[in-house]
Amino acid sequence: MGPHPAVAAIRLAVRRVLHDVLTDLAERPAPVRGGAGRGALLPAPGAGSPPLVLVACSGGADSMALASALAFEAPKLGIRAGGVTIDHGLQPGSDLRAAEVATRMAALGLDPVEAVTVRVGREGGPEAAARDARYAALDDAANRFGAAAVLLGHTRDDQAETVLLGLARGSGIRSLSGMPEVSAGPGGHGAPGRTHRYRRPFLQVDRQTARKACMVQSLPVWDDPHNIDPAYTRSRLRHEGLPALEKALGKGVVEALARTAQLSRDDADALDAWAAEAEAGVRDDDGRLECAKLYALPPAVRRRVLRRAVVAAGSPAGSLFARHIEEVDRLITGWRGQGAINLPGRVEARRQGGRLVIRQG
Ligand SMILES: Nc1ncnc2c1ncn2[C@@H]1O[C@H](COP(=O)(O)OP(=O)(O)OP(=O)(O)O)[C@@H](O)[C@H]1O
């Protein structure tokens, strides 16, 4: 008799991603320790031995299911499987819990296994600060172990919630595109050998399946009290918003939202590529943006060109919202002699003699 359908589903999802990791490794040159610099010729730790894939495991049902599937599938493909759990130090006893999660991962056969304690700052609010600290620690562990990939346990339900949160922010299709299946992680963009570091095998797997897989494998799981705390927006969405939507629109809502994410991602990527190409054509010989040419672009492309220019001038991408770009856009489409526009990062945009001047003050 084969495994329970829930276990089969999580294993299949992980197997697919491990195949992608292997394909990727075969196609790109081995990463080097010490970053991008020319002459950084030291092999990454573990180079020459079988590739290592780490799971980021909180001890919750999703990532415990992921850890179990990784432990089962990796050896069959000649991959070493390890795990990292992060102790954010935000609740009493979190260190003991992290140690217990590490023990559970080791019991699954993962090796190496590590519990890492981080210091969570304050920047951007408690959730963002915890996430930043977590990814920094995961990056560090991946570098130290020379891991080919780090797996995250986000499910289709998490994806649906992310799409709804993006929709409520009202900032365009990029924010509807949810979480990518493969990414460099925050701060890793452009870093060599890192663009494919983080992978989310469960984006097509629903939360119930992951939980069921833990249950039938008798894996103990830890339920984060934050996940049911109505003080958190995501928690309210999970326990009130989505059930209400399902009641009104039917059971397929979560799946439809996850599909929306994928379609939106493809559209957003295409528009970004269009904007990157269009940018050269709207600059004069001195490289300044020409308002008349910008005006002729489709609004979706123009706003992207403007965003790129503002970021290039030094505005931090994370602090730049749709309303900022709309204001800059009005210098092109609603010109009535308005003054300079102040943007995050002390960047200023003004219209001068038919040109758009964007610079840091
Ligand atoms: N403390 C942690 N240590 C290691 N990885 C973590 C930790 N917290 C979150 N992660 C990773 O990020 C993923 C998403 O976490 P998040 O808390 O947003 O979702 P979740 O639905 O509660 O997931 P889980 O059930 O796995 O805890 C997790 O599945 C896991 O891969």
Image (tube, rainbow, N blue to C red):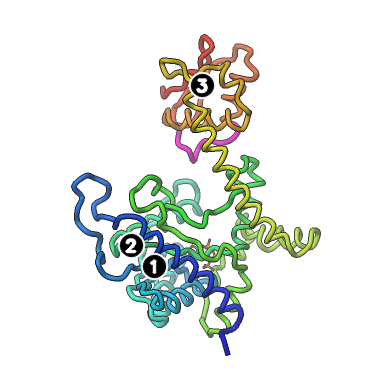
Bin the neighbour count of mark 3 within 10 Å (Cα to Cα): few under 14, some 14-19, many 20 and up: many
The mark closer to the camera, 2 or 3, is: 3
Q: Residue 308: x percent and y percent?
A: 48, 32
**Residue at (45, 79) in percent of width and height:** 72
Residue 89 visible in the displayed image: no
Front residue of this view, candidates 7 and 185: 7
Amino acid at circle 3: Val
Q: CA distance from mark 1 to mark 2?
A: 9 Å
Magenta highlight on residue 320: yes
Q: Earlier in the sequence, mark 2 or mark 3?
A: 2
Q: Residue 45: x percent and y percent?
A: 25, 63
Q: Mark 1 near ligand 1 (CB under 8 Å)? A: no
**Residue at (60, 19) in percent of width and height:** 332
Q: Which residue is mark 3?
A: 282
Q: Quadrant where the N terminus lies?
A: bottom right
Magenta highlight on residue 125: no
Q: Residue 43: x percent and y percent?
A: 22, 59
Front residue of this view, candidates 30 and 185: 30
Amino acid at circle 1: Leu
Q: Which residue is mark 1?
A: 54
> What is the span of residues highlighted in magenta in the rendered image?
315-323
Q: Which residue is mark 2?
A: 141
Q: Are marks 1 and 3 in contact (CB under 8 Å)?
A: no
**Residue at (39, 67) in percent of width and height:** 54
Locate residue 9: give its quadrant: bottom right
The mark closer to the camera, 1 or 2, is: 1
Q: CA distance from mark 2 to mark 3?
A: 44 Å
Q: Quadrant where the C terminus lies?
A: top left
Vertically, is 179 above or below 59? above
Vertically, is 117 above or below 269? below
SS category of the residue bearing label 3 = loop
> Seen in the image, is 193 located left or right of residue 252?
left
